Amino acid sequence: MQLYDRYYEAIIGLIGEIQRAERETIAQVARICADAMQNRGVIHLYDTGHLVNRELVNRVGGMASFAPLTFDFGVQNPNRYRDENKEPPIIPPTTTDTQLVSVVISRSNFRPGDVLIVGTVSGKTAVPIELAIQAKQLGLTVISVTAVKYSSQLKSDHPSGKRLFEVTDRVIDNHADYGDAMLEVEGLDRKIIPASGVGAVVALWGLVAAITDEMLQRGLAPTFFMSINLPDGPAIYQATMADYIKKGY
């Protein structure tokens, strides 16, 4: 079988596995999200650089209640001499991940009763873990989207020693294998093509479907986007946002 066909076979299998294995968790998370939305809460999305923030936010067929969270504290000041010779900075760094996350939350639209979805494949990085911990302390329900099999075999970078799936209220597993890549290839010394991006997006669009079911059962119609490229698309978009601002969901 060619790699092209093996890839699609693997992806179809992954989607089916997520559909079966995550059904109950996604149903639970859908009820949590519907509770938040019914009370004019927001569902915040933070992803460490894959598909989730871009795919689910401000997207045709997507919910207006989803809000992206992004931040970047990178400093670029390269100098080959000092970089190569590892000269220490004149002022030692003192800002911790805890303080950075506190600044992020203080400038965010987080409110108690909201939902925060945190996506990271490995689940070991300190900042997403700290974000989940502090958001829970603020009164948000925190959902992780991660690769549990992969993450459980890694050492956490967070001082607590915990991985993301160990600190959140619910865990949606994207079912990526250890190392994430899916396909063994003869002649190559490593697997190719990751599973996590597609897995996370499929799981979260499944969550959108489940939230919609839950909201409609309560007699509430969530606000969804139409394509801005349709005739009168910009006007439709403005009307959609006005509807969301009025309803809060």
Image: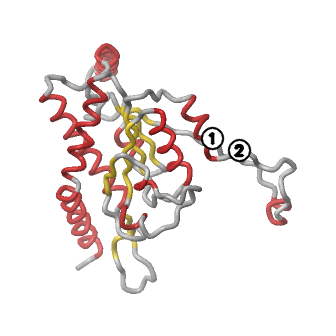
Marks 2 and 1 in Cβ contact (< 8 Å) = yes
User: Around disc 2, counting alpha carbons within 10 Å, would you say few (fewer than 14), some (14 to 19), or many (20 or more)?
Assistant: few
Q: Is 49 placed left or right of 35 in the picture?
A: right
Q: Which quadrant: the N terminus?
A: bottom left
Say which of 26 and 183 sits in front. Answer: 26
Q: Quadrant of residue 205?
A: top left
Horizontal and vertical percent position of residue 219: 14, 23
Above or below: residue 171 compared with residue 64:
below
**Residue at 48 percent of width and 50 percent of height:** 49
**Residue at 35 percent of width and 16 percent of height:** 245
Q: For mark 2, what is the residue?
A: 95
Indicate which disc residue 238 carries.
Answer: none
Horizontal and vertical percent position of residue 36: 31, 29
Horizontal and vertical percent position of residue 38: 26, 24
**Farthest residue toward the bottom?**
187
Three-letter amino acid code at the position of disc 2 = Thr
User: Around disc 1, counting alpha carbons within 10 Å, would you say few (fewer than 14), some (14 to 19), or many (20 or more)?
Assistant: some
Q: Earlier in the sequence, mark 2 or mark 1?
A: 2
Q: For mark 1, what is the residue?
A: 100
Secondary structure category for the residue under label 1: helix
Say which of 158 and 62 sits in front. Answer: 158
**Residue at 34 percent of width and 71 percent of height:** 182
Secondary structure category for the residue under label 2: loop
Q: Is 119 placed left or right of 207 in the picture?
A: right
Three-letter amino acid code at the position of disc 1 = Leu
Q: Which quadrant: the C terminus?
A: top left
Above or below: residue 38 compared with residue 82:
above
Q: Quadrant of residue 61?
A: top left
